[in-house]
Amino acid sequence: MGEDAKPPAAPAPDHPLKRLRAFTEARIGLGRHGAGLPTAAHLDFAEAHARARDAVHAAFDAEAIAADLRAAGHRLLRVQSQAGDRASYLRRPDLGRRLADGSREQLLTAAGEGPFDLVLIVADGLSATAVNTYAAETAKLILDRLPADWRIAPVVLAHGARVALSDPIGEALSARIALMLVGERPGLSAADSLGAYLTFGPKPGRSDAERNCVSNIRSGGFRPDAAAEKIAGLLLRARDLGLSGTRLKDDADDRIAASGTPAIGR
Amino acid sequence: MLQRAMTAGEGRTMPQEPLKTLLAQASPARSGDFLAGVAAESQEARVKAQRRLADTTLADILNEPLIDPDEDEVSALILDQHDAEAFRAIAGWSLGEFREWLLSDAATPETISALTWALTPEMVAAVSKICRNQDLIAIAKKRPVVTRFRTTVGLPGRLSVRIQPNHPTDDPRGVAASIVDGLQFGCGDAVIGINPATDSPAAMRRLLELIEELRLRLDCPVQSCVLAHVTTALDALNRGAPVDLVFQSIAGSQKANAGFGISLSMLKEAHEAALALDRGTVGRNVMYFETGQGSALSSDAHHGVDQQTMEARAYAVARAFDPLLVNTVVGFIGPEYLYDGKEITRAGLEDHFCGKLLGVPMGVDVCYTNHAEADQDDMDNLLTLLAVAGVNFVMGVPGSDDVMLNYQSTSYHDAAYVRRVLGLKAAPEFEAWAQEAGVFDANGFLSPETEGGSDRLIAQSKLLEAAE
């Protein structure tokens, strides 16, 4: 360091806009060095993104979920979509909506034990992290809340699944309602959100408007016990009314947004 | 299906594959074309298609509409816009020759812009497919498109920025805080544009009045926009809301536009209504459109046409209404359409290139989602490339994190970075204001952060008082 070199300035005090963070989650008032981000803000973002990326590529721990559900007395089936690996899952959502051949036969065999009021599906979707963390717990809480006269199909663990895989699964099992618990697309603020999608009369070709969605299920969001309560309520109404989707509930947050926002694993 | 004219010497004379097949086969690889089942089966097949495309003439392209104009109003519009007189001189050019001319010194801003209405979306999409990224940049750079409302956007040597202060519940203080954060970076000269959480005339009016109050208090030359549906804007406008720009998402076929709940006649009505308000000070460009590769396929409205060509067709819709701003939201749609940073980069450069050649005031939302194989480094690269290419505007989102739409775009910092490294300035009217406000220095660049320009701006906005 030359004699004239000045020591670096002390870090800037808190940015005045930081006080307004109370009104928005947006990353305001970060401060700048030249045009660049402060190191901490840069690494905060990088870490949030890294968490989201890891969630997208995390392995679906179906064994652990199966063991958990089996211990609670639930029967299980495992199926696979036509998306064989993660890259084709991401590139080809159409394949994630169709059953692999062997899987369909397996479901048709199980359908012999029917008819069923409900099939609950646990699917990896876009965040296996969410499913590995919350799906078994949420599934048990939902099933515990249903009346004893409901005929429940074996819980289906689905690999490489999009939401619409509910349709061929529900159809093959002749289930009146399909409920899928699926990992939602990770965001920067949360990489472990579980979504629940309810479809009455599942069959291929159902549209998003014919489903109901409860999203952001995670410990820091919609807590699994509260979510299970709400989902069980929706299931009861769906069976009573014989429908799902926009006509089931008028609350906007229960409906799948009709906006142009990118679909979550659909 | 219509056949291309096979006039001797003016077109190919061999039995032909349909033009849409050739265009799709020649398109640089991207996941959406594989999803649609129209992509070339091998890399060699793709280049061979590019060779056949290079030998195809501009007249061949014109003579074979990709979608029947009797069944698709966008196709009809494309033919209706076409300037046969200006086209005559270039009709016999092959696409290979057209590419070479665009790169040549004979192609100047004047000579290229003289062809604006001679060119159709299919022609510019086709030539883009035989261009490298470098060509897309070099040619677009020669075709500025300048538009005006309260600021002048698109002048050479300048780069404008949209402040995108979205909030998941449209909280007015949260939105205002994000706006002021952007202004202190010298952003906002393209537009202050909010994607509303609620698409209703009342919500739209509240947000517009918020921006209007801030704009007048700061005496800042900006235009506002709430990116609600065009019918919501018309409703709000009829009830007296201060509507500067009318927004709409658009796409390249009638069916895809129907999926957005719009038609050309609805856009015409909205355009006329916004013009009648006469709120601009330096110009009368009153529309703001967004597009993006893959939107037609996602609504099953692509008619077997590749996604990049469908995107270029959306610009025919845009240019019919003299917009102030058009931007492609290039990485928003997800990896099933553009898989990774490479595909997003290519698409961003193609869209900018095609828009500019068609006379569209093109900006780009340089962005990605968390399930795409992309990160901030990819965004830095594309932002820099586009700024070199002369992009009219980019997005400014606080810290790159859109907390309403849940995707990542460019930030206020990013905009400041790229203006600095390339010596690009803001729109002139805004530049003068920001100098006065102490945000910019005497040369029109962001003042050192130690000089307190931000603090003065925040004080003037009275934001902190609102927070007490």
Image: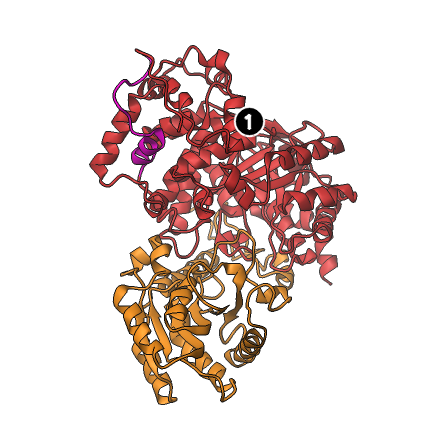
Chain colours: A orange, B red
Q: Residue at x 25, y 35 (%)?
A: B46
Residue at the far right: name it.
B240
Q: Amino acid at mark 1?
A: Leu
Which residue is disc 1 drawn over? B155
Part of the protein shown in magenta: B10-28
Say whether residue B31 is left or right of residue B268: left
Whether A114 is drawn above or below A258: the answer is below
Helix, strand or loop status at disc 1: loop
- Residue B110: x and y, percent? 49, 15
Residue A185: quarter of image: bottom left
Whether A150 is drawn above or below B351: the answer is below
Chain under callout 1? B
- Residue B269: x and y, percent? 68, 34
- Answer whether residue A110 is magenta in the image: no
Say whether residue A198 is left or right of residue B169: left
Query: Looking at this view, is A222 or A156 the one in front?
Result: A156
Whether A131 is drawn above or below B174: the answer is below
Query: Looking at this view, is A124 or B418 the one in front?
Result: A124
